[in-house]
């Protein structure tokens, strides 16, 4: 209630009170003596006086009722305003403070800690895989997950801490601690990482999340909440990049890495439409005959000043920023255009990102691309990682079914890396299994790897599924795979990934390329046009 409104209500209260007092005074002045005499039995009230008495009593009662009504209305209005004020400062879902409240109160906490010679720590927490929780389950389960997260944050918070929900799945916890005792902050972060990494059961659904946490402390050059938030945010992304469900303290090197990452992201946004991302090809060999079976498509960035940039630099950023779909479709289009000219016996394998598997229109987009480029569906093999299936099994079954209906083959990639592999093989109609390179590269030197490869080969054989081993880097590994019953492999032993020109030379030497003149690859055409312009 502002000042002018408050003055209006005060005037109304005064007016109602004045009417009540006036009625009472009028009653006493006009009827008081007569009523006193009548009550002593000395006289009788005449009719006019009786009416006057009744009217005065009614006036007093009306005035009192009006005054009470106005007072109740004032109380209700005040209560509503207090409720509105609470809502503007509190997150209604979790009961924690909201971002504005956090910013307002954090400044006061920082000043208080500085006066007392204490440090202030900011813990910035982001839920891992929360988007998947909403997409695979429901927003109601997502809301329940946020509420449980808030409860755990409040339970772990030290006395006097300030907790808030800062964004959709982002939380902040600010508290002071004794200078020289960062272990106290570590203990809070470790507890939250441990508790939030545990599986949840909500409405019959198994929820797997985690917490990526960034920590920052008040110090010289970082003495306000905006600077703390920025540093904690940088540290939080370092936790995500390191594998999620962990925490990191901010250090200066993170800021340098962030600047480099931002430069890469900016370059990618410019480079995708310019055709700077191109396909490279890794040979897939039939180990029994030594013949070329096909290629796996790999993305490379032909940067105008830095040269060829490998995928481990840009793929994580593409997935994080949502550029992976456009990048992948652009590179696939170039690969399809090229591969349709190869010998019909050669296949093309393409690995897709987990986010693409969450797209219900993914199968439609692939089919559309096949039609536009003229590449046969039966020569395409889509590789899906086990981790992607664990995150998106419900959607994956629908997408995979649509791909299979078009004649596209499916391979389960990175098989045996710790997920429920057998159940995945039974749940979806795969055509091939690919053994993760981590087992293949250590064959011969690690008995456990040998046992795993042997088990996967026998299991796949019993299911009628061919096996491809990734990471074949030496003749010894190739020979070992043959003894274990694995008869297809890929890796540097057969040659490094090749660009379009190198593939054409290889295929021409093996009579696997039609004699007709091929058009320049899409990336080359774009570069030629750019030079001509």
Image: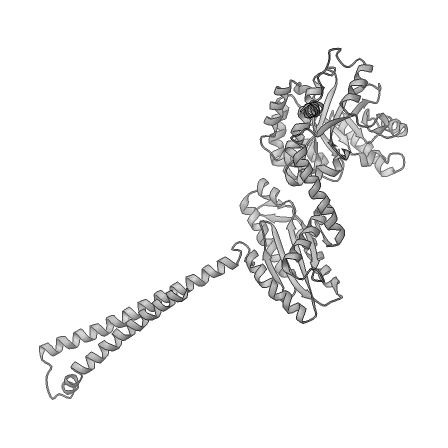
Residue 10's place in the image compared with 415, above or below, is: below
Query: Quadrant of the image for the N terminus?
Result: bottom left
Residue 114 appears in the picture as rendered: yes
> Could you tell whether 493 is left or right of 145 in the image?
right
Give the residue drawn at x 53%, y 54%.
Answer: 93
Please provide percent x and percent y for residue 374: 64, 17
Residue 180's place in the image compared with 357, above or below, is: below
Q: Nearer the viewer, residue 244 or 502?
A: 502
Residue 36's place in the image compared with 53, above or below, is: below
In this figure, what is the number of numbered marks? 0
Q: Nearer the viewer, residue 470 or 3?
A: 3
Query: Quadrant of the image for the C terminus?
Result: top right
| Residue at the farthest top position | 515
Residue 243 appears in the picture as rendered: no
Residue 148's place in the image compared with 453, above or below, is: below
Please provide percent x and percent y for residue 99: 57, 56
Please provide percent x and percent y for residue 308: 77, 32
Please provide percent x and percent y for residue 245: 70, 49
Give the residue drawn at x 57%, y 53%.
Answer: 147
The picture quadrant where one finds residue 266 is top right
The picture quadrant where one finds residue 188 is bottom right
């Amino acid at each position: 209630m502002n000042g002018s409104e408050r003055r209006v209500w005060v005037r109304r209260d005064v007016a109602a009170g004045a009417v009540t007092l006036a009625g009472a005074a009028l009653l006493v002045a006009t009827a008081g003596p007569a009523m006193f005499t009548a009550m002593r039995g000395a006289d009788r009230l005449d009719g006019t006086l009786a009416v006057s008495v009744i009217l005065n009593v009614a006036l007093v009662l009306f005035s009192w009722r009006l005054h009470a009504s106005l007072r109740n209305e004032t109380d209700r209005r005040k209560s509503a305003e207090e409720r509105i004020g609470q809502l503007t400062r509190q997150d209604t879902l979790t009961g924690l403070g909201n971002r504005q409240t956090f910013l307002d109160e954090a400044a006061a906490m920082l000043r208080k800690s500085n006066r007392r010679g204490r440090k202030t720590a900011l813990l910035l927490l982001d839920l891992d895989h929360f988007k998947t929780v909403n997409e695979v389950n429901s927003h109601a389960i997502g809301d329940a997950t946020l509420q449980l997260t808030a409860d755990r944050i409040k339970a772990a918070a030290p006395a006097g801490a300030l907790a808030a929900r800062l964004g959709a799945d982002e939380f902040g916890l600010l508290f002071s601690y004794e200078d020289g005792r960062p272990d106290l902050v570590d203990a809070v972060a470790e507890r939250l990482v441990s508790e939030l990494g545990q599986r949840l059961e909500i409405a019959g659904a198994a929820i797997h999340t985690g917490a990526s946490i960034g920590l920052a402390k008040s110090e010289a050059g970082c003495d306000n909440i905006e600077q703390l938030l920025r540093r904690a945010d940088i540290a939080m992304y370092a936790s995500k990049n390191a594998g999620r469900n962990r925490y990191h303290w901010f250090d200066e090197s993170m800021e340098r890495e962030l600047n480099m990452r931002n430069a890469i992201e900016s370059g990618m946004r410019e480079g995708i439409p310019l055709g700077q991302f191109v396909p490279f090809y890794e040979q897939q060999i039939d180990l029994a005959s030594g013949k070329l079976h096909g290629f796996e498509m790999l993305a490379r960035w032909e940067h105008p000043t830095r040269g060829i940039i490998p995928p481990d630099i840009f793929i994580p950023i593409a997935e994080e920023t949502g550029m992976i779909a456009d990048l992948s479709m652009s590179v696939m289009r170039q690969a399809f255009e090229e591969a349709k000219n190869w010998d019909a016996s050669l296949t093309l394998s393409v690995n897709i990102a987990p986010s693409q598997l969450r797209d219900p229109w993914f199968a439609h987009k692939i089919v559309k691309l096949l039609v536009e480029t003229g590449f046969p569906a039966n020569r395409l093999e889509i590789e899906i990682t086990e981790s992607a299936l664990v995150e998106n099994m419900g959607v994956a079954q629908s997408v995979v079914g649509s791909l299979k209906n078009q004649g596209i083959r499916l391979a389960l990639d990175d098989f045996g890396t710790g997920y429920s592999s057998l159940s995945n093989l039974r749940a979806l109609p795969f055509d091939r299994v690919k053994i993760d390179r981590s087992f293949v590269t250590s064959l011969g030197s690690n008995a456990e790897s040998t046992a795993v490869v042997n088990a996967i080969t026998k299991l796949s054989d019993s299911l009628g599924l061919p096996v491809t081993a990734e990471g074949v880097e030496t003749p010894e590994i190739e020979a070992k795979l043959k003894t274990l019953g694995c008869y297809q492999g890929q890796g540097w032993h057969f040659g490094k990934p090749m660009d379009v020109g190198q593939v054409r030379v290889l295929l021409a030497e093996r009579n696997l390329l039609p004699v007709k003149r091929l058009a320049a690859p899409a990336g080359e055409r774009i570069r030629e046009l750019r030079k001509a312009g």
